[in-house]
Amino acid sequence: MKNIFISYAADDPVWDQASVLELARAIDAVGAKVVWDVRHQASQGRKLSLAEWRDWMNSALEDSHHVLCLASEKYAALWKRDEAAMGGFGVAHESIRMNNKLYFQKSRNHGWIATVRKDGAQRACIPDDLQYDCSDYEWPKDRDMLMSHVSAKAQPQPIPAPVMTQHAPTESVAASAIQAPNPLAHQKAHSIELLAASTELQAATSASDNLKEWAKPASLDSPEKLVEWIMQLPIEDLSRTMRELRNCYAKAAKACKDEASKNAAASATAALYLLCVCRMVAIDTREQLVPVPGMEDDEAAVKLMASIVSVVLAGGRLRLQSAAANGIPLAEGTFSARLQGFSSDDELERALYATVVLSADATNAGLKTGPLTQQEYADLQQALEDIRNVGTELQALTLVVLGSPPKPGHRFRLAEDLQVPLFHTADEVAIQVLGMPPAKLISQLKALWKDVGSDIRPASPSAGHAAQPPWQEMLALLQQLVAQTKGSTDATTLQNQLAELETARTTGTKPSRDLLASTRRTVEGLNKVGDGFSDLVVRAIKFLEYFQ
C-alpha cells in the first residue's frame, strides 16, 4: 500500500478542510493510505507538542511514496517563507525537507512530489521549486489521472527499468493484468463523446449480430455500455472487434444523409478502434519509460505506435489525421520531436533545445555544444510542458529518436524528469508491448484509414472534440508581448497581426497560413529584445503552431 502525504496550508481559503477531506477520501477509495496531520492528531486523541509534531512530519515525509502539494497563492508564499504570509510553519518545514531530499537525489523527483491545484487556478500558484519537475493536476477535473498516479504499484527510487507483461498474440490475458483503466480515462470519454454524436453508428453497432453474440449477456444499446464492454475485453478478442467496427461503419455510412453525419460516424469509428489499440498496450504503470516496439521500418508507423503507447502512459487523447503517402495515418494528440540518434544527455538536450526553444532560423546557426546551462534546461522543460498542456485538453508527449542507439542501459534524464516515454527506433532488442504483432496492427490501421479516412474532414487538432481551439490563451499571450515591447516596430506589426487574428476568431473562420506564419516570424524576432519574457515567446510560438 502506498503512503500519500498531503502538504497544505492551514486556514487556506482555496484548500479548506472540506476540500482536503474530499481529496483524502478519494485517495482512500483507491486503496492508498492518506498521511495527513489532521488524521494523525485525531488518532492520538490529543494535541501534539511542537517537537512531537515535527518528528512525525519528518518520518512521514521520509516514508511517503508520494507527496501531494495542494498549491495556492498562500501555499506558494509559505513555501518560500514569505514573512507577509501569516502562519504556515508546517509548509515552511515541509519545503525544507522536500528540497533537501531532492538535493540529495540530484534534483530528480521521479514522481515523488506532485502538485494539485483547483480547477482553473493558474500555474503561478505552484512554488517555483516545483514548477518544472512535478506532475501537475487540477482538482477535480484530473481526478482519474491523479488517482492513477497515487494508486499505482509502489516503485523504488529511481524509476526502475520497464516491467512489461509479455504475451503472445493469441494468449488470453485478463484486462486487469494488462492495463488499469484509469490511464485510458480520456480516450474512453473521447470514444463515448464521439459515438454519442453519431446516431447512425450507434444504430449499426446495436444491430450487429456479431457484437451481440460476443457480448452476451451484456447489452450494447448505449455508447457508455459499448465502450465499457470494450474496456473489459480480453486481448485476443480485440482484433475481431476492430474488424467488426469497420463493418458497422460501412453500414452506418450508407445510412448517413450528409457529409457531417458521415464525418461523425467515421470519427467515432476511429475513436473506438484506437481505444481497442490502446487496450493492447501491456505496461504495468504509466510512469515507466519504454523503447519503441519492433515494426515496419517506416517513420509514420514508428510515430503512430509511439503516439499510441505515449497516450496510454500519459492518459491523453489520441485521434487520427491525414495519412502519410504509404497509407499509414499520423496521430494527433501527441508531439513527436524527430531527432537523429544521440547517445548522451547533452547531445539529446542540445538538439531538443534547438528544435523546441529556439526559432527555426536559429536551429542550425551557431548552436552551442556541451551541456545546457541550468536556465536553458529549465526553459526546455517548460517549453515541453507547454506543448503537453496546450489549450484545454491534456496532451501526451513523445520523444522519437531516429538513428544509432544510446549506450546500453542509458536513461535520458529529460525523459525521466518530465515523466514521458522516449522511443528510440534503433533499439536492438525491441520489447513486445502490443497484443498482436506490430506489422499486423499497422496493416489493420491502414485498412481502417482506407475505410474512414476520406470521410474525416481535415481539421485542427481539436477536431471531433467539444473542446474549442485555445483562441483566448493565444490572443492573451500575444497581447502581453505587444505590451512588453511597446514602442518598437515589432510591437506595431504584432498589434496589426493580433487584430487580424481577433477578427478571425470573432467570425469563426480559420486564420490563413500566411497570417500565422508572419505572426510567428514577428514573435520569433522578439527573442532579440531580452530574456524577461522568453517564456511568453516560446508559448506563443507553440500556440501558433497549434493553429497551423
Image (cartoon, rainbow, N blue to C red):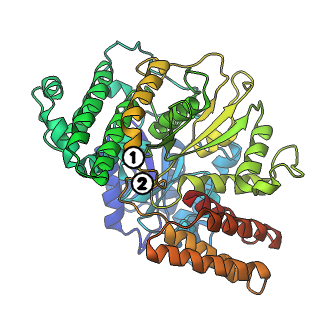
Number of the label disc, if any, that sits on residue 56 = none
* 144 horizontally vs 506: left or right: left
Circle 1 — which element?
loop
Could you classify mark 2 by the number of other residues whose Cα lies within 10 Å: few (under 14), some (14-19), or many (20 or more)? some
Q: Which residue is mark 1?
A: 456
Q: Determine which quarter of the picture holds residue 374.
A: bottom right
Image location (x, y in percent) of residue 48 = 43, 60
* 535 horizontally vs 502: left or right: right
- If the image is split into quadrants, where does the C terminus sit? bottom right
Q: Residue at x 59, y 59 (%)?
A: 95
Task: Give the amino acid type for the residue marked by disc 2 in the picture.
Answer: Ala
Q: CA distance from mark 2 to mark 1?
A: 9 Å
Q: Which residue is mark 2?
A: 463
Task: Give the amino acid type for the residue marked by disc 1 in the picture.
Answer: Ile
Q: Nearer the viewer, residue 206 or 467?
A: 206
Contact between marks 2 and 1 (CB within 8 A): the answer is yes
Circle 2 — which element?
loop
Q: Nearer the viewer, residue 535 or 116?
A: 535
Image location (x, y in percent) of residue 492 = 72, 83
